[in-house]
Amino acid sequence: MSAQENEALVRRYFEEAWVKRNLAVVDEFMVPNYIEHQIPDGQLTSRHSLKQLLAMYYRAFPDMKSVLHDILAQGDRVTYRWSVSATHLGDWVGIPPTGLHMTATGITIYRIAEGKAVEGWSSVAISRSEEEQRWLSEGGTTDDAFPGSGDVPLPGLGLERSPAFDALLRNLTWRFRAAEARERERIEHELQVARQIQQELLPERIPKLDGWRIAAYYGPAREVGGDFYDFLEFPDGRLGFVVGDATGHGMPAALVMATTRGMLRAVVQSLESPGVVLAKVNEALVADIPPSTFVTCFYAILEPQSGLLRYANAGHDLPYLRHGDGEAEELRARGMPLGLMAGMSYEEKETFLIPGDSALFYSDGLVEGHNPKREMFGFPRLRRLVAEREAEEGSVVEFLMDKLRTFTGEGWEQEDDITLVTLQRATQ
C-alpha cells in the first residue's frame, strides 16, 4: 500500500475507534498479535488487549471527545498528533466515578504492513484535572488516600505499567494530590531554575531588516514547557527563524530545549539547507535525549531582498502565510519530530513573501488554550484571525493575544508556554 493509503487507513481507524467508539474496527485494523508500546516502558501484546482497554475507557469516560490534529505518512509509518478531553463518570479499575475533568495529548506512530497495523508507539501526556489544580492551589491535604497506582491490578491485558496509565490512576485518587502537595516546594524551585534557563536562552534583541517588520512574544506557563525561538543572522544578510517545542515541562523540557537550540546553532554554521539542518540535529538528538522526549521544530531562512523563504518542518504546528489579498495559507513540509527516530529526512519547500505579505510562526500553547466551556481556541479560529488582520492595522502578536484572552476569559490558568513570531514585508 502507498503512504497515502496508509494515512487514509489510520484516519478511518481513529474516527471509528476513538470518535464513534466502534470496537469492531480494531479487528479490521490490527493483526491479532499487534503490539503497542507506551513510551517509555508500557506494552500491549495483542489486539484483544487493546479492545479490552478501549472498552474500559468507553465505560469510565462516556463523554470522551477525541480530536486528530496532524497526520503524516512516510513509507510504512503513519504518525499523528491527537488530544482527548473527558469526564470520569464510570468505574475505572476499582476507582468509582469522581466527576473529574481530564485532558490528554499525545503522538502515535503505526507501522503498517499489507493494510494492517502490526506495531505502534505512543507518547502520552495527561494533564492534571481542573479539580486537582484547584485543590492544590488551596493547599489541601488528606490522609484518606486511595491505594497507590502500583497496588491497582489490571487483569488480563498484559499491560506493563506505563507512565500514562500511572498518571491517570494518580489523577483519580487523593494520594496523588497529597503527593503533589508534599512536593510543591521542590517542584517550584525546579520550575524557577527552568524559567531562568529559558529566559537566558531567548534572543536578546530582534533583528532589524530594511523593508521588514519582525516581532516576537514568549509567555511562559506556570509549569514552564519547552518552547523556544531563535534568530540566526548570516554574513550575507539572510536571516534564519527557529520556533520549537520540547515535550514535557519544567527542568527536563528546559534542558532538552537548551540542547536543541545549541545543536541548531552549531549545525547551521556549515549547512545551507533547512531540511539537511533538521536531519543532522535529529541524528544528534536521538542519541542524546531520553527516549520518552522529542522536539517539534520549524526552521526557515529568509532572503530579505527577494523575499524568498526556504523552510523545513519537524512535526511543528504549521505556520501561516497571509497574502495581501487577505488569503491565509499553511506552510506545509513533511517531517517527523526531532529525537524520535534515526535516519529521518525532512522535506524542504520555499515560497516568496511579496510586499504586503506576512507570516506567523507559533507554538501549540496558543491553539490549545481553553475557554470555560472547555472548547479549544483551535487552528480554524487562528487561521481566520490571521486572514482578517491586515499588516497595517498594527501588531499581529498583540492582536492574537488579545483574542486569546477574550476567548479564555478571566481566571484562565495558562497550561503551556505560548510563543509567537511574526514576519511582515512592507507594502513599498
Image (cartoon, grey):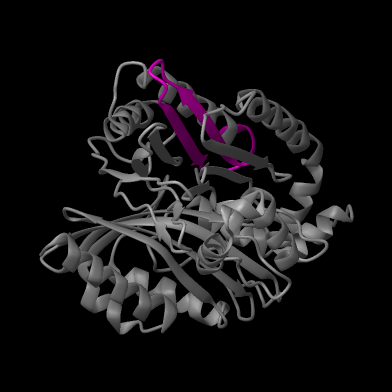
Asked if residue 346 lies left or right of residue 260, the reply is: left
Measured as percent of width and height from the top left, residue 198 is found at 64, 30
Question: Which residue is rendered at x = 67% and y = 78% of the image?
Answer: 97
Measured as percent of width and height from the top left, residue 274 is found at 32, 33
Asked if residue 261 lies left or right of residue 406, the reply is: left
Q: Quadrant of residue 126?
A: bottom right
Q: Quadrant of residue 343?
A: top left
Question: Which residue is rendered at x = 31% and y = 71% of the image?
Answer: 11
Residue 256 in the image: above or below residue 420? above
Whether residue 289 is visible here, answered yes or no, is no
User: Total of numbered circles in the picture?
Assistant: 0
Asked if residue 175 lies left or right of residue 286, the reply is: right
Measured as percent of width and height from the top left, residue 294 is found at 43, 40
- Extreme residue toward the front, this view: 428
Whether residue 238 is in magenta: the answer is: yes
Q: Nearer the viewer, residue 397 or 289?
A: 397
Question: Which residue is rendered at x = 49% and y = 39% of the image?
Answer: 244
Whether residue 291 is in magenta: the answer is: no
Please provide the residue range marked out in magenta.
224-252
Q: Nearer the viewer, residue 54 or 425?
A: 425
Measured as percent of width and height from the top left, residue 124 is found at 48, 55
User: Which quadrant of the figure contains the N terminus?
Assistant: bottom left
Q: Nearer the viewer, residue 297 or 35?
A: 297
